[in-house]
Image: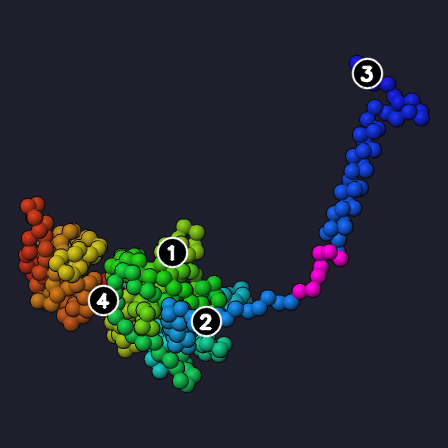
Amino acid sequence: MSFGRPQPGRPGAGGLPLVLSGAAAVVVAWLAWDRFGPERVHGDATPRPVVARGELAAFEQLAIEIFRENAPSVVHVGSRARTWLGHVSEGSGTGFVWDARGYVVTNYHVVQTLGSEVVVRFPGGATHRAVVVGGDPRVDVAVVKVVDPPENLRPVIVGSSKDLLVGQAVFAIGNPFGLDHTLTTGVVSALDRVIDSVARTPIQGVIQVDAAINPGNSGGPLLDSAGRLIGMNTAIYSPSGASAGIGFAVPVDTINRVVPRLIEGTQGTGPALGVVLASAFRYGQNRYPVVGAVAENSGAEEAGLRPGDVILGIDGIPVTSMEDIPAILDQKEIGESVELDILRDEGTGMRRRTVEVVLKTERPR
């Protein structure tokens, strides 16, 4: 079936509907303009009245106060070292003022990436040259000394990590992605974690937090709700390289043990049991470290220690955290024997035993 062409002077078969639809469109457009035209859309207006904020919530006031009191103690640690091609390479991390003499604590892996010229930038932008005093890659702690420190330095207030509880509030200050003095908050997610250091040795007793930790936060302080230093932000678990809500901090008890030795220049080899601690075991009201592995040819192996043994005490001193062990061994000498009070699964139940271990030299720090 075919359609012929319309004859001159006679409308085609679809002409009338087109005329009617066009007329309808004109009517609709006119009505819209009449109702929504510029003279009807715009009108007199004034800013909305502002409602008073009222008092800040207690947790907001706490976070503000902690940041205000501790931000002056947090610095940017970096470098501007020229490569053999003439380019400038920059390291970037965070640190915190340890004492009024200009000693600054940061991560070992931060200073490891720096060049020959270390610089410390203080709040307000003042930049000072610094030198690396020493570092311990086994626990990822380092100390730098500002050559000509400014007056009125604000050292951090040192707390304790031994008595932390899961659920406690934490506050992290750092320079993520080079953004100076950034505050993030969260809670202690877990305790007694074990992570690998830059020396591929386990750092024990690590604090896990959910406060956002990103590249550049390394070396920054982790604070409790009293504004005390309880750890140093060190690493994150992240498939993407950015914060995934799992961050790790070296406990302050480790820092407070290692930093004085680095400043004095006496950090080196020391006595060791020869075990790697894996977790914590609750026995009674306390949590005790569990042996995860025993090193070959160590005093622990010779004494018959096994993975799964729970260490309750050393020479009569209770051991209720992973950090207690190095703190006790620091008072001992290589070749000295110590008596371990352990809890062992004998197959028929957990039994307490006493084991004598000869302390041997640990690998150099």
Task: Identify the residue under disc 1.
Answer: 245
Per the image, label 1 sits on a secondary structure element best described as: loop
Q: Nearer the viewer, residue 99 or 57?
A: 57
Q: Residues within 10 Å of mark 1 (few under 14, many from 20)?
A: some
The three-letter code of the residue at mark 1 reads: Gly
Location of residue 98 by image quarter = bottom left
**Magenta run includes residue 357:** no
Within 10 Å of disc 4 (Cα), the crowding (few <14, some 14-19, many 20+) is few
Q: State the residue at coordinates (41%, 75%).
A: 68
Give the residue at mark 2. 54
Which mark is first along the chain, 4 or 2?
2
Q: Amino acid at mark 2?
A: Gly
Residue at (28% x, 78% y) in the render: 264
Q: State yes or no: discs 1 and 4 in contact (Cβ < 8 Å).
A: no
Among all residues in the image, which is located at the extreme bottom?
Answer: 151
Q: Mark 3 and mark 4: span between their CA atoms?
A: 94 Å
